[in-house]
Image (cartoon, grey):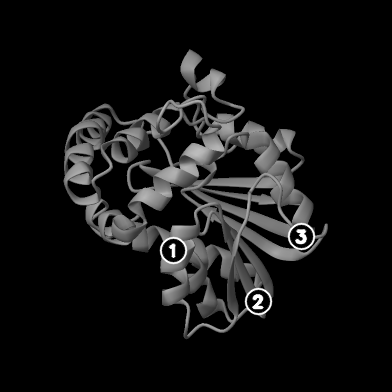
Amino acid sequence: MYFWGKLNKKGCSVVSTAHEKASSMGTPLTPYNTEESKKQQVATMFNNVAGTYDFLNHFFSMGIDKLWRRKLVKLIGRKQPKMILDVATGTADLAIAESKLHPTKIIGVDISEKMLAVGREKIKSYPMIELQLGDSEALQFPDNTFDAVSVSFGVRNFENVPKGLSEMRRVLKPGGTLYVLEFSKPRNWFIQKLYYFYFCNVLPFIGKLVSKDARAYSYLPESVRLFPDGQQFVELLQQAGYKDIECKTLTFGISTIYIAGK
């Protein structure tokens, strides 16, 4: 199921558009176009869809998202981290998958209280997992706390991407590692056409029917289109002070795993 993309000398292929360059601080796109900050709007959006989020997530990806997370956890497990922070943890799917690594502690943070409420029901049999309401750009942890920081499908929603990357680096121990799983843009022309047709037509239609929040599932493809993926994201990691950066594409480039050391 996995298709690992070849890396160029800098780690990833390059896609550059004016929109993507303008989005490097965090996409200017907001879910609802209100006067609230992007952060507040993202919290509202996920509160709105929390009840149907898990079902739609797995349905839309045909279960491939579970395989992506499994691959991510396998990569995290190479260093056997004891303290893990999962940023934008949502309903705790990744945190639960990380529990198989037998760490001492996993802390998941998210800005959506209703997503965390769903997650808390799921983690009742996972005593090593703790979920907290928190802001990825202002993490309430001391410097050098975690062996690993993970974030799956969350960086795209940061209000200020460089600030979030810097905060995650701050709480990493020296020698610790950041793991990011995020949507990216397929480079193959045919796959790209299929991908955007599905993302821009099928997904919003079904999402509106099931979640009752039409904007949430039209925001998703727009945010993916504007996200600075590939080499642009690698450069943001470098600017935030990360080193030894790896970039691995999955499933025709639909998503990418970024690994970056402190």
The alpha-carbon separation of the residues under discs 1 and 3 comes to: 21 Å
Residue contact between numbered discs 1 and 2, judged by CB atoms under 8 Å: no
Q: Residue at x 33, y 42 (%)?
A: 252
**Mark nearer the N terminus (1 vs 3):** 1
Q: Which amino acid is tagged 3?
A: Phe
Q: Quadrant of residue 33?
A: top left
Q: In the rendered view, does 37 fall on the left or right side of 48?
A: right
Q: Position of residue 87 (x, y in %)?
A: 58, 56
**Mark nearer the N terminus (3 vs 2):** 2
Residues packed near mark 2 inside 10 Å, few (<14), some (14 to 19) or many (20 plus): some
The alpha-carbon separation of the residues under discs 1 and 2 comes to: 17 Å
Q: Nearer the viewer, residue 127 or 62?
A: 127
Q: Residue at x 23, y 38 (%)?
A: 204
Q: Position of residue 177 (x, y in %)?
A: 68, 57
Q: Residue furthest front?
A: 35
- To which residue does mark 1 refer? 91
Q: In the rendered view, does 57 fall on the left or right side of 258?
A: left
Point out the frontmost of discs 1 and 2: 1
**Label 1 SS:** loop
The alpha-carbon separation of the residues under discs 3 and 2 comes to: 14 Å
- To which residue does mark 3 refer? 141
Residue contact between numbered discs 1 and 3, judged by CB atoms under 8 Å: no
Q: In the rendered view, does 58 fall on the left or right side of 149?
A: left
Counting every numbered tag in the picture gives 3
**Label 3 SS:** loop
Q: Residue at x 30, y 34 (%)?
A: 218
Q: Which amino acid is tagged 2?
A: Lys
Q: Identify whether 56 is placed above or below 163.
A: below
Q: Quadrant of residue 217?
A: top left
Residue 105 disc label: 2
